Amino acid sequence: MVEKLDTAGWYRRFALVETRGYSPTYDRWCTGISEDPRLLALLEDLPAAKRQPNLLLGAARFHGAPATPYPQFRAFLLDHWSQLRETMLTRSTQTNEAGRCAVLLPALARIAAAEGRPLALLEVGASAGLCLYPDRYGFAYDGGPVLSARAVPDALVMDCATTGHPPLPASLPRVSFRAGIDLNPLQVGNDDDVAWLEALVWPEHTRRRDRLRAAIEEARREPPLLVRGDLTVDLQALIQRAPADAVVVVFHSAVLAYVEESGREAFRDTMLRLTADRSRPVHWLSNEGYGVLPGVEGALQKADGEVDRLFVLAHNGQAVARTGGHGQSLHWLG
Ligand SMILES: C[S@@+](CC[C@H](N)C(=O)[O-])C[C@H]1O[C@@H](n2cnc3c(N)ncnc32)[C@H](O)[C@@H]1O
C-alpha cells in the first residue's frame, strides 16, 4: 500500500528515501521545502499530482537552477515561480534511463534463446524510447569485460553489480522490431524534449547524464516508433504491428506508479491473459517499484516501514529479480 502523505511529508519522505546518500543537492532542497510554509503553500496551489518532488526539481533544473544550498535555491524558486508553475503544469516526469537495459538484458536474452527467434520489443511508458535499444549498448557486469555487439563508446556501457547469479548472456539478443507507447512520447530529435530529459537527471549523476546524451545520439540514428497512447488501452493494436516471425516482449520500467490502482490491475490481467494465449505467445517483463504491481508473485515480504528502494523484475507475473532503480544493480532471486 502506498501511504498518503501531505505535501510536507511527501518532500520529507522523498529526501529521506530517494535522495539521501544519492543526491546531496536534492536532499538539501527537499528537506528545505518540507520545512518551508511559503513554498509548501505555492505547491499546494497546484493540482495534487503536480506537487511531485521530482517534477519541481526537474522544472527548476530545466529553468537553470544551479546546485546551490537551500537558501539560494529558495530564492530561485520564488523568482521564477510563474515559469516553474507553467512547466510543472505542462510537463510530467519522464526520466528515461537506458541503464535499465542492464537489468532487463538477462531475461531478454533468455527469452530469445528459449524461443529461438529475434525479439519484437514493445515498451509501454517508453518516454523517448531509450530502453528499446539493448542490442546497441554495451554491458559490464561486476566490472567484467564489456558485452556488446560492436565497439561502443564508454558512455554507452551500462555498469551493473550483480548478486544471486543472474543468467548473464554470452551475446546480445537480436531485435527485429522496436516500438513504444507513451501518454506523451518524447522525441530524441526535439531540443526541448532533450533539455527536459537532461533536467530530469539529478545534479550529481554525471555518468547518467553522459549516458543519456550518448543514448540519445544512438537513438537519433534510427529513432524508435513511438505511439501516443495509454498502456491500458492501446497495447493490443501495437502488438498487431510486430512481425509474425518475432517473439513479442512487452516490457515496462518505472511506469505503473503513475497509473491508478484499478488501471494497474486491469493491465496486469490483460498481460496475464496475453502471456497465456497460445495463438500468439507474448512475454511480459515488468520492472517496477516495490508494491507497485499488485499480485506479482515471489518472496517479497518486508517489515512494516522498511525503506525499500529496489524495484521488482517480474517475468510473466513471477518475480525473478530485485533491481536498482536506474539499472545499477541486479539481484537474481533464483
Ligand atoms: C519515469 S518514465 C520511465 C520511462 C522508461 N520506461 C524508462 O524506464 O526509462 C514513465 C513514463 O511512463 C509514461 N506513462 C505514464 N502513464 C502512462 C500510461 N497510462 N500510458 C502510457 N504511458 C504512460 C509517462 O508519460 C513517462 O514517459
Image: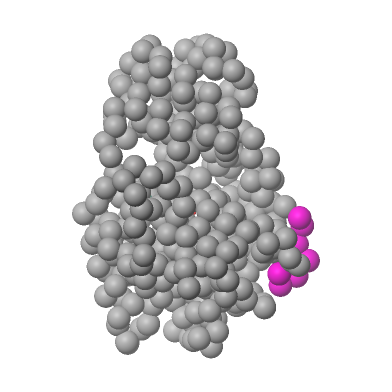
Nearer to the camera, 185 or 162: 162
| Residue most extreme to the left | 262
Residue 151, magenta (yes or no): yes
**Is 227 displayed left or right of 155 in the figure?**
left
Q: Which residue is drawn at 32% across and 64% down?
A: 296
Residue 181 among magenta residues: no
Question: Is 106 placed above or below 86 here?
Answer: below
Looking at the image, can residue 33 be seen?
yes
First to last magenta residue range: 147-154
Picture residue at 50% right of the left edge, 51% below the top = 325
Q: How many numbered circles are shown?
A: 0
Where residue 293 appears, as percent x and y from the top left, is: 32, 58
Task: Give the dominant element type of the magenta stretch: helix, strand or loop.
Answer: loop
Question: How far across and down, in percent of the image, does residue 93 sit?
Answer: 44, 40
Quarter of the rendering containing residue 7: top left
- Please tell me which residue is depicted at 58% across the width and 29% down the height of the picture: 24
